[in-house]
Image (cartoon, coloured by chain):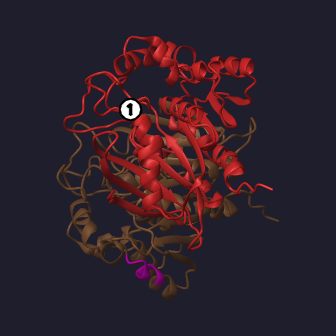
Chain colours: A red, B brown
Amino acid sequence: MPLETKSLWTSHGGQQGVYSHASTACACPMTFAVFVPPHQPGAKLPVLWYLSGLTCTHANVMEKGEYREAAARLGLIIVCPDTSPRGEGVADQPENWKLGCGAGFYVDATEQPWAKNYRMYSYVTAELPALLAAHFPMADMGRQGIFGHSMGGHGALVAALKNPGRYRSCSAFAPIVHPMTAEWSRGAFAAYLGADETLWRAWDAVALIEDGARPPPLLVDQGTADSFLEDGLRPWLLEEACLAGGVPLTLRMEEGYDHSYYFISSFMADQLAWHASFLSEDIVNF
Amino acid sequence: MPLETKSLWTSHGGQQGVYSHASTACACPMTFAVFVPPHQPGAKLPVLWYLSGLTCTHANVMEKGEYREAAARLGLIIVCPDTSPRGEGVADQPENWKLGCGAGFYVDATEQPWAKNYRMYSYVTAELPALLAAHFPMADMGRQGIFGHSMGGHGALVAALKNPGRYRSCSAFAPIVHPMTAEWSRGAFAAYLGADETLWRAWDAVALIEDGARPPPLLVDQGTADSFLEDGLRPWLLEEACLAGGVPLTLRMEEGYDHSYYFISSFMADQLAWHASFLSEDIVNF
């Protein structure tokens, strides 16, 4: 699994890199970003996955997310994948920002023409972790957390719910908690997963919790001035499912914040500190 | 002097705004960004000016500079002007990134066709401060500092040297300290200021210090892996001029850092704390 280094910057005492590789899961070249904080030679560091939202690549959060100061201080590796397959031969609807490139929704598509490339769930939860472990010897794959924004918040919740024990912590900024009933995601779910909506439940955080899946500790920040709050995001649906299922959830409504990186960056350091409280120490079994 | 609000985001507890107005100095519409930190009603806050480098607008540092966390914590207003006039009727050489739009060099041009619009010195040191004072009642214009990056580091140094007593502190990331002898700035100086190089000394930090100007406290961060270090930046020339002139200078060579916002953002909070040490308290005269 060769890896090409596209860029490498010293930042906040660590190294921010951008890498590309030939992805098996997505059947195309894929690009992702990794920040490695300053560390002692031989040290093993926890890994925190950040999944981005609709229209983004790896670059948006890398440039605007303001995660490096806290990640350097807390000793966290931050990995930022792309949001979909891209490039020549990859199915797309360029005029539709809710389907195709930039809108992978972190599912494994079963329908044509999407099934060939749109396997972002396998990419993010299997192929990329293996690649990271192979190329970043300081990454402690026994200590992983996951978080994300909007569509990436959905991706983080689903990845955590479908892989009990894999992630020690899961958080989100303004996640799409119930994509199978939200207008802006139903089109993509139908295209990627087909018309049988019962199959969509395997890719929906609220439905997974209703169906018995249990997440690691959950934290959600949601801006009260987010223009997608009422129609697309609806965090109260997650709150209700967690309450009904006896699942602890910390949901923080953040007054005056919208859906942008000006919101994300405001609570980034706080979410990283929260993850670090679960990731920083090896769990010792007596 | 009417002001149009283009964008306004809640971020880090404060407000990040983008504004536009009809500039008299530049004879065209101009856009700038202001971050106002959280504060008590009626409070007066110090103002720190950030001048950006070649090719930038107000947006680069606003998106990638990571200044809001520290500015909110320290109670600093951060103002980020554009780097040149722009738009219809404004002279430009679109194929040349070192002259025209994005390359105002914070001088008042005397030569045609530039003299009509390229008056960034007057814009940044006179027109915009008056506009800020008129529209931001919490801005304490008696407590100003200035800093910048690359071409904007040059602009900050020159503004501070030409206005003794105006700015309490001046810092820079990788500034062009001696533009009249640097290859990448000589073309712009010749175009804006004419062939008589003796007139260029009024717009050159090293020459101004040689000619007796004295700055407020000075801090410079310079990355050792900056590809412009040897030819364009040459911080040792500032060091020599300061030494010869008895001017205190703190020059920090930052190991492994380049010329990018990954460098700037790494030392942003530190530079803000340094400015705040001069700006946070009113000077009391006994």
Q: Nearer the viewer, residue A92 or B147?
A: A92
Q: Measuring 56% from the left and 67% from the top, which residue is drawn there?
A: A38
Q: Residues within 10 Å of mark 1 (few under 14, many from 20)?
A: some
Q: Measuring 53% from the left and 64% from the top, which residue is drawn there?
A: A138
Determine whether the residue tagged by mark 1 lies in a helix, strand or loop: loop
Q: Measuring 29% from the left and 57% from the top, which residue is drawn there?
A: B109
Q: Is residue B157 left or right of residue A276?
A: left
Q: Nearer the viewer, residue A146 or A62?
A: A146
Is residue B59 something one can see in this rendering?
A: no
Would you name the residue on which mark 1 appears?
A: A55
Q: Main secondary structure of the magenta part?
A: helix
List x then y, in percent, for residue B15. Answer: 60, 36
Q: Which residues are magenta?
A: B234-239
Q: Amino acid at mark 1?
A: Thr
As drawn, B104 above or below A42: above
List x then y, in percent, for residue B8. Answer: 53, 31
